[in-house]
Amino acid sequence: MGFRSFAASLPAALTGLSGTRPVLRSPAEPTPAEAASFDALVQRLAYLPKADIKRIREAYKFADEAHLGQFRASGEPYITHPIAVAGICAEWRLDAQAIMAALMHDAMEDCGVTKTELIERFEAPTAELVDGLTKLDKLQFSTREESQAESFRKMLLAMARDVRVILIKLADRLHNMRTMQAMAPDKRRRIARETLDIYAPIAHRLGLNQIYRELQELSFSFINPWRHAALLKAVSKARGNRRDLVARIERDVVKAFHEAGIKVEIQGREKTLFSIYKKMREKHLSFAQVSDIFGFRIIVDELPGCYLSLGVLHQLYKPQPGRFKDYIAIPKPNGYQSLHTTLVSPLGTPVEFQIRTETQHLVAEKGVAAHWMYKTRADGQTTQQLGAHWLQSLIDIQDETRDANEFLEHVKIDLFPDAVYVFTPKSKIMALPKGATPVDFAYAIHSDVGDHCVAAQINGEPVPLRTELRSGDVIEIVTAAGARPNPAWLSFVRTGRARSKIRHFLKNLEQEESRDLGEKMLAQALRAEGLSLPSLDDEDQDAAQLWQQLARWAGNRQVDELLIEVGLGRKIASIVAKKLARMLAEQGQRPDAVMLSMGRFVAAEDAPTQGTVLLDGSEGASVRLAPCCRPIPGDEIRGYLGRGEGLMVHTAECAVGRRLYQRDAEHWIAVSWAEEPSRSFEAGVAVLLQNGKGVLAQVAQAVSAAEADITHISMSDESQQRETAEMSLLLSVRDRLHLADVLRTLKRSPAVLRAWRIKPQA
């Protein structure tokens, strides 16, 4: 047993760094150094059959020819980069297809090689890997961010189909980060920030902790070089100051395990500079206050030895209460398994110990890459399955998110390193990101459970849906058949799956409501022409053909798309109705044809006379009541069809509405209230009060007596200092008559001097 400092495995001084993109120069023959580097790679591929190595050599020759004449910013031949990437993949013992793809990963992007050519030379699986690694540079995007997001989406979806894609990409990014010194400082910082935000968390999510730590460390050195240098100096000094303490703890631990007769391997573990910096920032600590810089790792042969070793350590030093974690019984989402305990050293400083088996250590360091190095774990589950749940979630998110930036946003949300562990009522353990809520839990169970969630219980107690979950909580979700997602949930959910499911549902709901509104508006417009709406039933062949012709005329592929655009105001219902009337006349269904040519009226008397749309409050998001005038049933109203915004309803006397009408009259339609509205509406009311004790209670009592509700209340700070105060209320009322009754009741209150409805500003 010997002590090995973790710091020794870190990049020494981050020297010898070079660029990432090829620079074209005059063609040159491969140098002896290139040949030697590939020969070194071949030696590391001894685990593969000779036939596979022969194919890899062919891939090397192909890549070498493709990159001939290309050099890195450091002046090295570009082929040295693919060889280095393949070497990192060889450390994980990836198969021949992955090594070949690593050697050719830039061939399509930088050398004009086609996917078809790769399929012909190296078969489809290898070509698919290379294609998954290729950015979408050939497509035109409006911004660099859009291009980057779309390329990320392509890569992550390719990763979900084949995890080797991301392993090769991480190896590529790791070598680029190791060799980036020759690049301009601003470009170094941009790439380092991207690595810290995306690639390092992906490595952690897939259990590649060794890569995760190194990517973090390298990114930190490029983003904050001065802080990195200062911390490196401080850690070196602390290492020297604590050498005696570390040696003493090592001797005590070795002696204790020897006396217990347990065979273990003891490794020293040192906190990375980035994790020290992060802890200092998050907890507002000085370097001297960070006590757990050094720790130990105990590696045993068998699983029972982990718990026996824990007993030996707890007998040797006193454990710190609340600092023990059993990640063997409850693994982390990325498959990490270890026992963690923090003990008090002889000098009173805390020292963390991690205890695990050799297999668990391999998975902890290599994650999904351990699948190729150690085919099965002790429980028979392949390590490649450890990231399967998250990879499948990428497919689910993609199915509901067509926008690349939105997809990337959801993926970033799911890359949280911390997790909480909660239980279903049937005692199944589920891991969720820190800060997750019962809504996240519901969507993690099933999308239908999330969509119909109405309440939740934690440990048998009812809680709000925005409550943050804690490890050990038992969660029970209450559902209702008629329930549906609330847009407010988007403000507190934490998982990308929940966020994408909610957005997808709301988007579809908005389209359904817009379609219904469009159908209603078109029916009203046709009624003004003396016609009824043709059947939308697919079984009516004549009507279906008529609708399809109308959709094609309007530039839509389907009838539903046309109705949605009418409901959103992108197409004017009266113009579509005129065209439909003409089509009906041409079929002989109406003798007096309406003269219309491609949406333009041939005479002034043919101006659109659109029917009135009835509103009862059940129209949903496709119909909105203007906040400037807050119309309620009984008010004279009119509707504005904003382009792509649905129907906005204003009162007839609203100044904002009048200005819109003067500017865009053709988008205004006639609307009126239904006889029996299905819900209540908000109205603004101002109340002048005699300032004094209990006046607010009197106002609330008067409103309640009139069977209305207060949805919002406000009062200026100046009003509170005067003898009289003016209060603004938002009241939920049925109609104008109900509002008049509320105002009369308010005026009868002793504290109220005046009460009136807030009129729209002129």
Image (tube, rainbow, N blue to C red):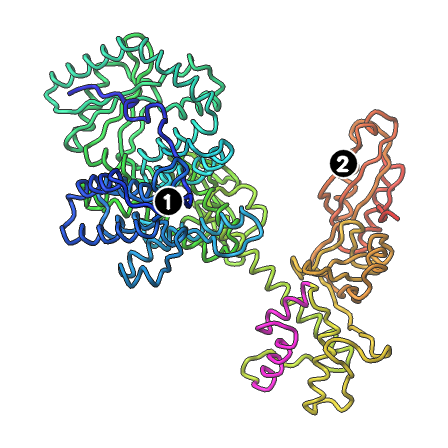
The overriding secondary structure of the stretch rendered in magenta is helix
Q: Residue at x 30, y 21 (%)?
A: 352
Image location (x, y in percent) of residue 727: 81, 36
Magenta residue span: 541-568
Instruction: Give the side of residue 376 with respect to residue 272, left or right.
Output: left
Instruction: Give the side of residue 435 with respect to residue 620, left or right.
Output: left
- Of pointers 1 and 2, the one earlier in the residue sequence: 1
Q: Callout 2, which amino acid? A: Ser
Image location (x, y in percent) of residue 263: 12, 24
Q: Quadrant of residue 31?
A: top left
Instruction: Identify the residue position indicated by label 2 in the image.
Output: 714
Compared with 589, 603 (above or below) is above
Q: Residue at x 28, y 44 (%)?
A: 30
Image location (x, y in percent) of residue 425: 37, 44
The local secondary structure at tag 2 comes to strand
Give yes or no for residue 721 being in the magenta stretch: no
Q: Quadrant of residue 86?
A: top left
Instruction: Identify the residue position indicated by label 1 in the image.
Output: 425
